[in-house]
Structure formats: structure tokens, C-alpha cells
Image: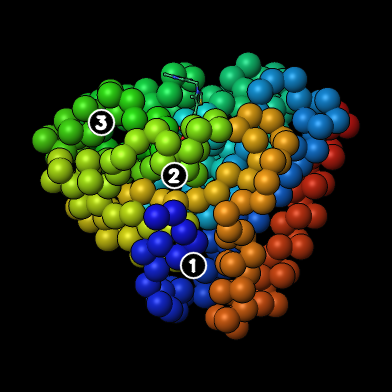
């Protein structure tokens, strides 16, 4: 069921402008390089808290942020990429992870609770899935556009499913996203359940799709789903590093970053993409170096 081509639409990348494709790729590069620097700082002992890295999953938030602009964001513990994709400032996030008072939550929220009123992102409490009923309540009270992101394991919490049902009944403006890396820490989704979230969402009457983490495919579907909220998208992706921390046990099921670079080459954007990749790395490395020295 899980695969790098699940739900693929041939040549979908050609339906997007050069600007959109490169902007999306730049976000992927920012997130990926940020996470590699976080890993490095953790391995060298600068970071003393548990960290939840998004390496391998960066296409999901990068694509959504292009297709679903300026929502109020309710994410969970694995969320550095989401903060960065939606325009969160880089230095305050570095400082947060380095326990500094200049961090976005004064260095006390940490990796799992990235909170930023500036971009409308609400920090997570640590209780799996509780961001979903809170997101639904926020949409009910404010009637404003909400992005509610869960992992494939958090999706299994009863309060997640019941609040999605409520959102469907009340036609609330929420895009529900399941970042489905197939894992709850180490337990694979196939071991945990025999049902799919997309069928749950459809049973509530929502528009719902299940796809792989091809960013163009995500942008295509999210643009459509955003027109009829609430709606749901389940995206198969791969977690490269440990649930918490920086180790790696095995190769990921697929390497989306590499595939995206190939796709950009096929679009005639190889040179621009390489330049973005190199410049982003230099830029993020420099910022980390500077903050680590302070
Ligand atoms: C209610 C609850 N149960 C268990 C935990 C311990 N826990 C933290 S994260 C996690 C797995 C989360 O998996 P998923 O939602 O798929 O997100 P991922 O880590 O894969 O990104 C577990 C079991 C918790 N924080 N809250
Ligand atoms: Mg998971």
C-alpha cells in the first residue's frame, strides 16, 4: 500500500509555474539543512532536550504551505519543518533549540512545542493528537482558515476522529493533514490497524485523498481540497532519522529529496535548483554557526 508513487498523476509537475516549483524546493532545502544542523548540534551536545526531526518528510509541509496560504496552524511534536515552511524566522528557532531566552518560546518550549503567534502557529502540549480538537474548536470560534496536522498514530486517538466528525457536521474551515510516515515510534501502521483514515474522513462526508509525498501532487490536491473545507489528505512519507534524536536504523523506503531533484531536472530547472540547494546550505550553516558561537 505505501509507495513512492501512490496516487501519482503523470506529469503533474508540469502544471505548476517555475516560480512555484522553485519556491517549494527552496522550502525543502531550508527545512532539510536546518534539520541536519540540528542533528549536528545535538550530536555535539549543545542540545539537551528531546528533538523530533523531519528529515525525509520536508516535501509535505513545503508543498502545503504553497497551496494553502496563511492558515492558523495546529501541528504536533515533529514540527520544525512546518514552522519554517510557513515563514517562521530561523534564528529564534535555533535559539529555542539551544535553550536561549531569545528562542520563540524563550527557550522553554523546545523542539516539540514550537509556538509562534507571528505566523499563527500554536505550540503542541505533548498529548498525541490533542491539537486536532483544539484546531476544530479554534475554527468553530473564529470561523478562520485552519490547518490541523496529525501523524498516522495520533490519527488513531478517539478525540481526533470525533472532532473531525464534528468539523464535518458543522462545515468548519479546516484542512486536516495526516503526515503518514507509517510509524508510531517504531510500530508500523500495518501492525496497529486494518482501517484507513481516508475512509474515516469520507464516511464523515469530507472530500479526502490518500497520496504519496510528491510535492506537486500534494499542491494539486491541496488546492482542490481547500475549496471545500473541511477536507482531509493522508500523505505517505518517510522518516529518515529516529523518532526522537538523531540515529538512523535503516535506509528510508524512498528518498523524496533525490526524486524531487530529478523531477526538477526533467522540468529544465536543474541549474536553478542546484544553486538554491547550495546557497540555502551555506546560509543555514552560517546562521547555526553564529548562534552556536554566541
Ligand atoms: C496520548 C499519548 N500517547 C502516547 C504518547 C507517546 N508518544 C509520543 S509521540 C508518539 C508517536 C507519534 O506518532 P505519529 O503521530 O505517527 O507522529 P510521528 O512521530 O510519526 O511524526 C507516541 C506514542 C503521547 N505523547 N501521547
Ligand atoms: Mg507516524
Left or right, 91 with reference to 21: right
- Residue most toward the top? 108
Label located before the other in sequence (3 or 1): 1
Mark 1 closeness class: few <14, some 14–19, many ≥20 residues within 10 Å: some
Q: Secondary structure at mark 2?
A: strand
Give the distance between the C-alpha atoms of the residues marked 2 and 3, in whole angstroms.
16 Å
Residue drawn at x 62%, y 78% is: 265
Mark found first going from the N terminus, 1 or 2: 1
Q: Which residue is mark 1?
A: 20
Q: Where residue 266 sits in the image (x, y, percent)?
A: 57, 81
Compared to residue 269, the image places residue 210 above or below, namely: above
Q: Residue drawn at (71%, 62%), measured in percent from left and top?
A: 277
- In the image, which disc is placed on residue 180? 2
Residue 161 bears which disc, if any?
Answer: 3
The residue depicted at 39 percent of the width and 33 percent of the height is: 192
Question: Ligand 2: does it lie within 8 Å of the C-beta at label 2?
Answer: yes
Amino acid at each position: 500500500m505505501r509507495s513512492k508513487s501512490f496516487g501519482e498523476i503523470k506529469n503533474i509537475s508540469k502544471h505548476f509555474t517555475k516560480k512555484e516549483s522553485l519556491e517549494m524546493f527552496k522550502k525543502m532545502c531550508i527545512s532539510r539543512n536546518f534539520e541536519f544542523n540540528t542533528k549536528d548540534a545535538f550530536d555535539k551536545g549543545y542540545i539537551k532536550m528531546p528533538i523530533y526531526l523531519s528529515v525525509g518528510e520536508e516535501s509535505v509541509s513545503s508543498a502545503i504551505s504553497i497551496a494553502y496560504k496563511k492558515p492558523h496552524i495546529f501541528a504536533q511534536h515533529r514540527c520544525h519543518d512546518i514552522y519554517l515552511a510557513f515563514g517562521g524566522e530561523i534564528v529564534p528557532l535555533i535559539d529555542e533549540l539551544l535553550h536561549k531566552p531569545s528562542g520563540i518560546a524563550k527557550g522553554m518550549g523546545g523542539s516539540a512545542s514550537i509556538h509562534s503567534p507571528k505566523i499563527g502557529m500554536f505550540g503542541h502540549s505533548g498529548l498525541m493528537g490533542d491539537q486536532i480538537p483544539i484546531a476544530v474548536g479554534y475554527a468553530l470560534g473564529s470561523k478562520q482558515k485552519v490547518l490541523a496536522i496529525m501523524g498516522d498514530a495520533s490519527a488513531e486517538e478517539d478525540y481526533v476522529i470525533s472532532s473531525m466528525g464534528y468539523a464535518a457536521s458543522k462545515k468548519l474551515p479546516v484542512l486536516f493533514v495526516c503526515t503518514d510516515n507509517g510509524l508510531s515510534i517504531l510500530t508500523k501502521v500495518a501492525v496497529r490497524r486494518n482501517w484507513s483514515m481516508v475512509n474515516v474522513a469520507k464516511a464523515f462526508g469530507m472530500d479526502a485523498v490518500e497520496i504519496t509525498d510528491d510535492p506537486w501532487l500534494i499542491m494539486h490536491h491541496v488546492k482542490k481540497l481547500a475549496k471545500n473545507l473541511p477536507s482531509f489528505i493522508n500523505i505517505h512519507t518517510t522518516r529518515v532519522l529516529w523518532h526522537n534524536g538523531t540515529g538512523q536504523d535503516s535506509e528510508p523506503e524512498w528518498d523524496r529529496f533525490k526524486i524531487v531533484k530529478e523531477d526538477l531536472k526533467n522540468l529544465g530547472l536543474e541549474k536553478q535548483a542546484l544553486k538554491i540547494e547550495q546557497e540555502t546550505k551555506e546560509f543555514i550553516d552560517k546562521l547555526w554557526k553564529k548562534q552556536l558561537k554566541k
